Image (cartoon, rainbow, N blue to C red):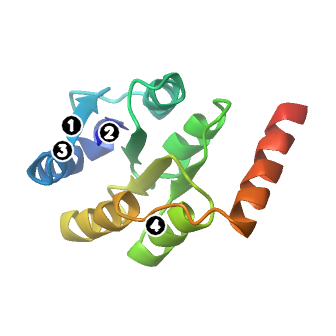
Amino acid sequence: MKIGIGNDHSALALKAEIIEFLKEKGHEVVDYGTYTTDSCDYPVYGEKVARAVVAGEVEKGILICGTGLGISLAANKVKGIRACVCSEPFTAKMSRAHNDCNILAFGARVVGGELAKMIVDTWINTEFEGGRHQRRVDLLMEIEERN
């Protein structure tokens, strides 16, 4: 799978761990930055990854900032994105199975490297169940269309 990843300055080290983990699992990773620990604005990187997902440049996205919240809010402003913040594997699983989320976000100040890998692995390997859940995802997308 081709996965886009983005981060702010607080998540540089964790991003490097996640990129290595994804490559070990056979995934192709596109890094949308940031590339330094210099203070930066997380909305820039949330939007970059979100636009790449919507454009089909990557299949899914992963975003990391201090908490995962700010960068996911930025991504969710892009039409067609369903970004979720997950701090444990169960939420990651349900975000894919029931909500068909196309971007995963988490916080470098919230989860450590090993937990982050478990979250990523669960999220990537969970398929959308469709069925009654598709109707609900469609309702979400209708809200987006109306606004």
For the residues labelled 1 and 3, the Cα–Cα distance comes to 9 Å
Q: State yes or no: discs 4 and 2 in contact (Cβ < 8 Å).
A: no
For the residues labelled 2 and 3, the Cα–Cα distance comes to 9 Å
SS at circle 4: helix
- Which residue type carries mark 4? Ala
Q: Where's residue 140, x and y in %?
A: 78, 50
- Which residue type carries mark 1? Glu
- Which residue type carries mark 3? Ile
Q: Where's residue 9, x and y in %?
A: 30, 36
Residue at the disc numbered 4: 92
- Which residue type carries mark 2? Ile
What residue is rendered at 32% in x and 26% in y? Answer: 32
| Residue extending furthest toward the right | 146
Q: Looking at the image, can residue 53 be seen?
A: yes
Residue 3: assigned label: 2
Q: Where's residue 63, x and y in %?
A: 40, 44
Residue 19: assigned label: 3
Which comes sooner in the sequence, label 1 or label 2? 2
In the image, residue 145 sits, relative to residue 134, either above or below, namely: above
Which comes sooner in the sequence, label 2 or label 3? 2
